[in-house]
Amino acid sequence: MPKTKAHPIGVFDSGVGGLTVMRSIVETLPREQVVYLGDTARVPYGNRNAETVRRYARNATDLLREREIKALVVACNTASAHALNALVEAYDVPVIGVIEPVARRAVATTESGVVGVMGTRGTVRSGCYPEAIRAIDSACTVEQVASPLLVPLAEEGWLDDPATERIARHYIDQLSEPDLDTLILGCTHYPILSATLRRLTEEHLEMPVTLLDSASATTRALVDVLDAESIRTQAKDGGELEFLLTDLSPAFVEATERFFGNRPDEITHVDIVA
Ligand code: DGL
């Protein structure tokens, strides 16, 4: 079926972290219909093997395709790292991942040419950020640190808790490049911890550091795709938003407010076909 301007944009993440990207999309494109799918029944993806993540990402995309999306945003670094190419090949809608847009912004931002990446084990192991950054500027140095425990801390909303500080410090202390001036929060769960992460990184490196998350660079990439394909909505009114989760436990419902900025009016449970 041909996709038209009136169809929704699909946004997918392993859980609620992708709502940090959804929020930026809705702020930038308020007239678009957007359907969000969080695979809360199977989160976290970060420690899983690449083939499993690809299978999960295909299941999620199949479900969103039933809603006739005109474009798909993979608002999950881990799924973008492992599954983006497979999704681009397998589906006939534009698919926008989070890695490339943020890599571009990091290269444009860094003055020292030294970029740090915090992400899940899967994202870090895949090497997707070093590869994307060096494809743009081969002179850049990229230092990565896998920070898996930040995902549950963000979901629990432990933003200022001493435990979060201790765990974040454990990861940040592993950054050893003295000239690192740009730090990619390479996981869509991390932005809600950004105040703590910035403070600890600047303390550790003893200099100001620019933090980049997935939201605004990915939204910009989405806008470019919608314009290139001439599929921006012509609607005059605000677009409808739909929130789908594969597990509707109260903790996830509560977390949507933290990650999205306000509590969605309605969240629907969906079963994903594995
Ligand atoms: N939000 C996911 C990401 O951006 C990570 C959470 C997970 O481990 O599933 O990588």
Image (cartoon, rainbow, N blue to C red):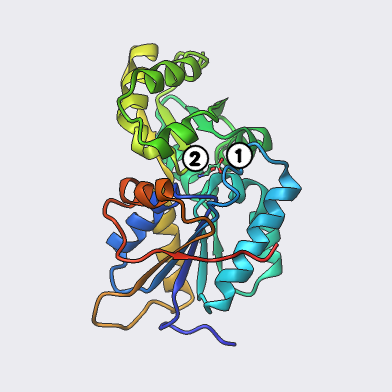
Tell me where residue 210 sits by quadrant. top left
Please, what is the three-letter code of the amino acid marked with disc 1? Gly
Residue positioned 43% across, 49% down in the render = 252
Label 2 – label 1 distance at C-alpha: 9 Å
Please, what is the three-letter code of the amino acid marked with disc 2? Cys
Residue, far left = 237
Tell me where residue 112 sits by quadrant. top left
Residue, far front = 250
Q: In the figure, 123 relative to 163: above or below?
A: below
Q: Nearer the viewer, mark 2 or mark 1?
A: 1
Residue 135, percent from left and from top: 61, 42
The quadrant of the picture occupied by the N terminus is: bottom right
Q: In the figure, 185 relative to 144: above or below?
A: below
Decide if ligand 1 comes within 8 Å of the CB at mark 2. yes
The one of 259 and 250 positioned closer to us in this rendering: 250
Residue 61, percent from left and from top: 61, 66
Residue 76, percent from left and from top: 53, 49
Residue 106, percent from left and from top: 45, 38
The quadrant of the picture occupied by the C terminus is: bottom right
Residue positioned 40% across, 24% down in the render = 181
Decide if ligand 1 comes within 8 Å of the CB at mark 1. yes
- Side of 114 relative to 194 (left or right): right
Residue, far bottom = 1
Q: In the figure, 261 relative to 230: above or below?
A: above
Q: Mark 2: give few (<14), some (14-19) or many (20+) Cα within 10 Å.
A: many
The reply to whether callout 2 and callout 1 are in contact (CB within 8 Å) is yes
Q: On the image, numbered disc 1 is attached to which residue?
A: 46
Comes first in the chain, label 2 or label 1: 1
Residue positioned 49% across, 27% down in the render = 116
Describe the element under mark 2 as helix, strand or loop.
Answer: loop
Q: On the image, numbered disc 2 is attached to which residue?
A: 187
Number of marks = 2
